[in-house]
Amino acid sequence: MLRRLTAIVLLLALINCSFSRFVVCTGFGLNRAYISQKLCVNRTRPWLHCNGKCYLMKKLRQAKENERKQTEKDNLSRLEINFFQEALVLSFLQPVIPNQQKAKFPAYSYGYSSRYTETLFRPPKTLA
């Protein structure tokens, strides 16, 4: 029941946005006597035979302006910004690592000698 009620309310809100001029004209037709007596700008001048048409025109202008603003908002929300990245070009004809001079290291010297091990490590003397 709640879902159905929510769907009806949302549908009416959607229809009201789309047909706001129709709603204004219908409201004017239903309340014509009240509008011509209380809300009309020319109610003090009955010889103009306005009968609330000025109020209707003002409301229709407002409805049209509201629809225009709503469409501008919708258009701004749909605004797309396109971004194009330039394609990366790889050239396999050029070497990836440029030829540089080889690093100069000193010649490796093998500094280990077994001659000195006898002076440092002597087996323990036995007491026999």
Image (spheres, rainbow, N blue to C red):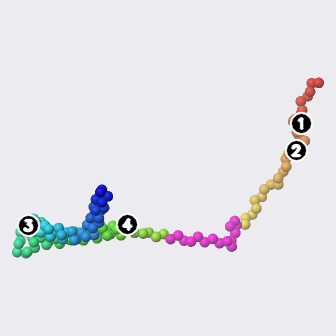
Residue at x 14% of width, y 70% of height: 29
| Earlier residue among tags 2 and 3 | 3
User: Which is closer to the viewer, label 2 or label 3?
Assistant: 3
Image x and y of residue 121, in percent: 87, 35
- Can see residue 96? yes
Residue picked out by circle 3: 37
Amino acid on which the number 4 mark rests in the picture = Ser
Amino acid on which the number 3 mark rests in the picture = Gln
Image x and y of residue 11, in percent: 29, 64
Foreground pick, 30 / 121 = 30
**Labelled pair 3, 1 in contact (Cβ < 8 Å):** no
Residue picked out by circle 2: 113
- As helix, strand or loop, the secondary structure at mark 3 comes to helix
Foreground pick, 16 / 5 = 5
- Can see residue 41? no
| Earlier residue among tags 2 and 4 | 4
> Is 101 contained in the magenta span?
no
**Labelled pair 2, 1 in contact (Cβ < 8 Å):** no
- As helix, strand or loop, the secondary structure at mark 2 comes to loop
Within the image, what quadrant is residue 12 found in?
A: bottom left
| Earlier residue among tags 1 and 4 | 4
Foreground pick, 95 / 21 = 21
Amino acid on which the number 2 mark rests in the picture = Ser
| Earlier residue among tags 2 and 1 | 2
**Labelled pair 1, 4 in contact (Cβ < 8 Å):** no
Find the magenta span and give its range.
Answer: 84-98
Whole-angstrom CA distance, mark 2 to mark 3, is 122 Å
Residue picked out by circle 1: 119
Whole-angstrom CA distance, mark 2 to mark 1, is 12 Å
Within the image, what quadrant is residue 99 found in?
A: bottom right
User: Which is closer to the viewer, label 1 or label 4?
Assistant: 4
| Earlier residue among tags 4 and 3 | 3
